[in-house]
Every structure is written in structure tokens, then in C-alpha cells.
Image (cartoon, grey):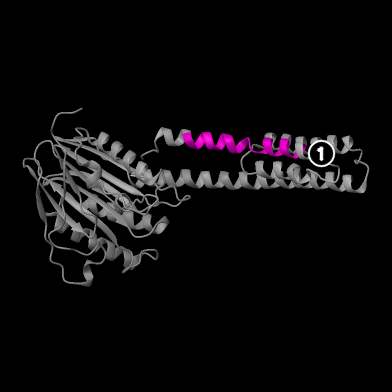
Amino acid sequence: MARRTEPRRAQGRGVMRWVRLLPLPILLGGAAVDYFTSPEFSGAAFYSAAPMAGAPVLSLPALVLTGLAACGTDVVLLLHFDSLDSPGGRSELASVVTVSAVAIVINRLLYRSDVRLRSARMIALAVQRAVLPQPPPRVGTLRIAARYEAAHSGARIGGDLYAVQDTPHGVRGIVGDVRGKGLEAVETLDVVLGAFREAAASERTIADLAGRIERSLRREAAQRVNLDEVEGFITAVLTEIPHDGGELRLFNRGHPAPLVLFEGGVRRADPSHPELPLGLGGLIPERPLVDTVPFPDGATLLLHTDGLTEARDRDGSFYDPVAGLTGHDFRDPDALLSALLADVLRHTGGRTSDDMALLAIRRGGAGG
């Protein structure tokens, strides 16, 4: 699983430190208003706001100290104006004490909710890693790198997938995007990856391999409640790189076109014939057409899901990986993916709205 860049995490930690300090200036501002104005003006609103501002971000001891400081400051100012024993003074102090107590209750509720969410995220991450293991870093003369960049939308599990397998026909791979998220997407993902791993070595062509996955999806859709026979589809690209040839074969089922990088140039491998996504091929007669693309020594194949091309900046402009990668010669697939993810985060301002699955395969060439 890919992780966010360190500068972004450091920036987030810096913001949180400032947010945690927010109750202090609120409390000091209330004391200044209370002290330097006439007795008719009260800083009670500030004393109540300080613990409430700290409730979502402070630890329990820090919040308790904030509440005590708010109550203590109010008592000191009430004594200063000799109004602690008045009905208005007692009412003011009671309101500050009450709001501080409510802030502590809110803090505990948020803490428990955060603990549950963290647990759910850890479980989701464990499930994702179990279903989607990392491919081998090297198969023969091919070097391989893969990344899964989650959009961190709560604890929901995404449906992007990738897999690579060495077979007698060559090194075969798949990158796909299951419709939807959550457990339903994971079930579909599990069916697709299971069918791919089982049939990758036995099917004669990658078009036949796609047909095998198609049949598995239709069979499981008829047997499982959570797999919709019509709407449970997946866009995917299946690839085959022969062991002894300078070419690769692609079979695109409604998925974003792969990219081939070589000596600073980038070529988009658009399919010569459009095909429906996996899971929908049974709706019309299939006419499978596998495309052959030159793949010489030193070239890199980049497969990705639509989370890459649909990443937007603040103006709504989509990220263009062709423009972002043109002119760069990445001799290591892992370095390519790191640079690509960093460029996407710069484009979006550090915000992504969809998961991204990336798979890079480089043929030979010098490492570096």
C-alpha cells in the first residue's frame, strides 16, 4: 500500500498543533474583555467557548485543565468585580461549569467514535492487503512495481485491483476497477482475482482469459446475493508480455488506456476496438480483439485506474499523466510510481477523491 508523502503528513501535524492551542487565546481574550471593560460586560461566552473548542482535539487531561482554567478565570474576575455572590455571578459561573462538563462528554463520545473508526480502517487495510498482495518485484527480465493509493474515504474498502503472474505464455497481468466500494466490491474483486490466478496459466490467449473471468462473474452473480448480475461489472486491462519478444499484448475491457514510456516519450495504448467491461460482455456478441504494442528493452508499461486521470485541481482540471511523464526517463518502476503519485498530489493540492491502483512493468534496461 502506498503512503502519503512525509511533507503532507508534517503539514497536517502542524495544523493540528495550532488547532489544539486555540482554547488558550480564546480564554485569554475572554479574560481581557472581562478585565478591561465595565462590569456590565462579561467574558462568560469566551470561558464557555474555550473548552468547547478543545473538545474535538484535546486529550481528556488537557480538556479537564482547560475547563478548570475557564472556571477559575471566571471566578477570579467575578471576585475582582465583587459579583461572585450575586445571582448573575452564580448563574454565569454555573453556565461555564455546565458547558465545560458537556465539552468533556462530547470529547469522550468523539474519542470512542474515533477508536471505532480507526479499528474499522485497520481491518479494511488488512482485508485490502490480504486480497491484493504485492506482485513480485522481478520476473525474468521484467521489473515490477505496484501501488494502491487510497482516497481515505472513511473505512470503506475500494474496488481497484492489480495482479501479475508468470505463465508459460508469458507474464500476464491485470489492472481493474470494480464498480462501487465496500464489501460488495471486495466480493467482486475476490472473484476476478481468483479467476485470473486460476486461469492465467491455462488459457491460450488473454481474450480467452477475459472470457474465463467473465464466466466466473456471471456464475457467482447467480449464486451470491451481493453480486449484481448486470451492475456488478468491472473495467479492466489484461496484458501479456512474451518471455522472448519485444512486444506486449493488451486486451482492454472498457478501462483507461495504458501508457508505454520509453526514453522520455509517452505513448497511450488506446484499444483498436472498444469492448464492454467484464460482467457485461454477455449482453452483446463478443468480438475479442487483442492489440499488440511494441515493447522494446528499456520500455515501461504503466497501467492505472481512473483515479489517476480523474484527479482534479482546484479549478476542476483533470490530471494528464501523458503531460506529467513526458520528458522524464524513469529507469526504475518504483521510482516512476513515486514520482507520479507526488505529481498527482501537487496537481490536486494533496486531495484525492478516488482510489488509484498503479502497476508499472519495465523490460530490462539499466537500473538506477
Residue with the mark numbered 1: 74
Task: Name the residue type under label 1.
Answer: Asp
Q: Quadrant of residue 227?
A: bottom left
Asked whether the viewer can see residue 140, the reply is no
Any part of residue 11 in sight? yes
Residue at 59%, 48% (x, y): give it. 113
Residue sitting at 25 percent across and 43 percent down? 324
- Looking at the picture, does residue 191 appear above or below residue 136? below
Quadrant placement of the C terminus: top left
Residue 18 lies, in percent from the top left, at 58, 35
Quadrant occupied by the N terminus: top left
Residue in the foreground of this view, choosing between 365 and 138: 365
Residue 51 percent location from the top left of the image: 70, 42
Secondary element at tag 1: helix
Taking the magenta stretch, the answer to whether it contains residue 318 is: no
Is 16 one of the magenta-colored residues?
yes
> Residue at point 80% right, 37% down?
36
Name the dominant secondary structure of the magenta segment.
helix
Left-right relation of 290 to 96: left
In this rendered view, identify the residue nearer to me: 239 or 152: 152
Mark 1 surroundings: few (<14), some (14-19) or many (≥20) residues within 10 A:
many
Identified at 62% across, 46% down, the residue is 110
Query: At which x and y percent is residue 80?
Result: 88, 35
- Label count reads 1
Q: What stretch is highlighted in magenta?
A: 11-31
Residue 265 picture location, percent across and down = 15, 41
